[in-house]
């Protein structure tokens, strides 16, 4: 893969991740069913990639790896379920922008967990993301669907940042595709008891949206992301994936007539610019902000 094709693969991956909320809204199923189905189809897609396209050999899992992957799967379950609740409650735009707060959580938690010094550009990132979220919130009435949805989306970002730090701790031994597949197995097993009674009522068209979520927005997007990182720097990947909210909001605007307000657009711009600038300054030292985006 050349740098040019790798960059193209990254943009395709970012577009697919941006479609996550769109497919979630199109599927008239509960968040538990959507996430369960997404995990099942993702496992199939990742297994095919690992078998035929991945050059990395799988590693024998140690007990510590198993515990870390189990924890990662539980965090991924919470992250996806809370994100799709946000989509159902507040729409794709607010859900996507709320989730985009995860780099700020990652900076704070990384400093606490790994005892790393928080630098000035990272403090600026946290401040700008916080300002952006305030601007994105239409009002602060908890009875409002938009506010409730944003809180679910921010919770999704928090869980994703915890997931990224969990994956960072185990990345030295377990290849990314193997870790993603194992974590998706955990997601499916966690949600099977809740999803099973509802599966018979899922419409065929909804299964199509869920399959697209699992195969394209998870399996294929993750595979493209991992493959491109062999040639593209992590900070370049972070900049490209900062485009994810732009893709998601644009498509939601075209499909669902979700017209973002000027205030929301300004808030979203502040969040995206903060992520881009921070990743450029930080370089590739902190891959958890950018390189873990593939799990979304």
Image (spheres, helix red, strand yellow):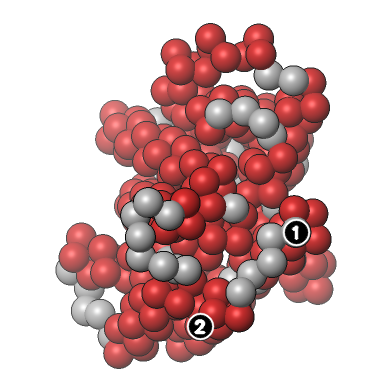
Q: Which quarter of the picture shows residue 211?
A: top right
Residue 136: x and y, percent? 48, 71
Name the disc covering residue 225, or none. none
In the displayed structure image, the side of residue 242 where residue 51 appears, left or right? right
Is 13 placed above or below 212 here?
Answer: below
Is 195 placed above or below 67 here?
Answer: above
Of 53 and 35, nearer the camera is 35
Residue 215: x and y, percent? 72, 37
Q: Mark 2 or 1 closer to N-term?
A: 1
Of 234 and 21, nearer the camera is 21
Give the crowd class for mark 1: few <14, some 14-19, many >=20 residues within 10 Å: few
Q: Secondary structure at mark 2?
A: helix
**Badge nearest the viewer, 2 or 1:** 1
| Residue ID at (33%, 82%) | 127
Q: Which residue is mark 2?
A: 270
Q: Secondary structure at mark 1?
A: loop
Q: Which quarter of the picture shows residue 107?
A: bottom left
Residue 293: x and y, percent? 53, 58
Can see residue 182?
no
| Residue ID at (39%, 80%) | 131
Give the crowd class for mark 2: few <14, some 14-19, many >=20 residues within 10 Å: many
Q: CA distance from mark 2 to mark 1?
A: 23 Å
Can see residue 24?
yes
Q: Which quarter of the picture shows residue 247?
A: bottom right
Q: Which residue is mark 1?
A: 257
User: For the image shown, how many numbered marks are present on the structure?
Assistant: 2
In the displayed structure image, the side of residue 99 where residue 224 appears, left or right? right
In the displayed structure image, the side of residue 203 where residue 87 appears, left or right? left
Residue 274: x and y, percent? 48, 82
Of 163 and 82, nearer the camera is 82
Is 49 placed above or below 17 here?
Answer: above
């Amino acid at each position: 893969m050349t740098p040019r094709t790798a960059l193209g693969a990254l943009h395709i991956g970012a577009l697919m991740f941006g479609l996550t909320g769109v497919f979630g809204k199109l599927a008239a199923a509960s968040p538990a069913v959507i996430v369960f189905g997404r995990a099942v189809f993702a496992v199939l897609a990742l297994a095919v990639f690992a078998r035929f396209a991945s050059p990395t050999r799988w590693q024998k899992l140690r007990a510590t790896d198993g515990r870390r992957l189990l924890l990662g799967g539980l965090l991924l379950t919470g992250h996806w379920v809370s994100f799709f609740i946000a989509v159902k409650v507040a729409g794709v735009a607010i859900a996507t922008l709320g989730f985009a707060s995860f780099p700020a959580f990652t900076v704070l938690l990384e400093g606490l967990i790994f005892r790393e010094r928080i630098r000035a550009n990272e403090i600026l990132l946290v401040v700008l993301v916080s300002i952006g979220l305030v601007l994105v919130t239409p009002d602060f009435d908890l009875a409002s669907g938009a506010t409730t949805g944003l809180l679910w989306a921010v919770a999704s970002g928090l869980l994703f940042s915890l997931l990224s730090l969990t994956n960072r701790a185990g990345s030295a031994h377990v290849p990314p595709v193997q870790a993603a597949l194992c974590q998706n197995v955990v997601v499916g097993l966690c949600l099977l008891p809740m999803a099973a009674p509802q599966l018979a009522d899922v419409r065929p068209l909804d299964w199509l949206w869920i399959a697209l979520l699992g195969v394209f927005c998870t399996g294929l997007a993750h595979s493209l992301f991992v493959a491109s990182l062999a040639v593209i720097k992590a900070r370049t990947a972070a900049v490209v994936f900062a485009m994810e909210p732009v893709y998601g909001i644009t498509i939601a605007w075209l499909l669902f007539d979700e017209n973002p307000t000027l205030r929301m657009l300004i808030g979203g711009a502040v969040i995206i610019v903060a992520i881009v600038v921070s990743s450029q300054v930080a370089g590739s030292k902190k891959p958890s902000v950018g390189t873990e985006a593939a799990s979304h």
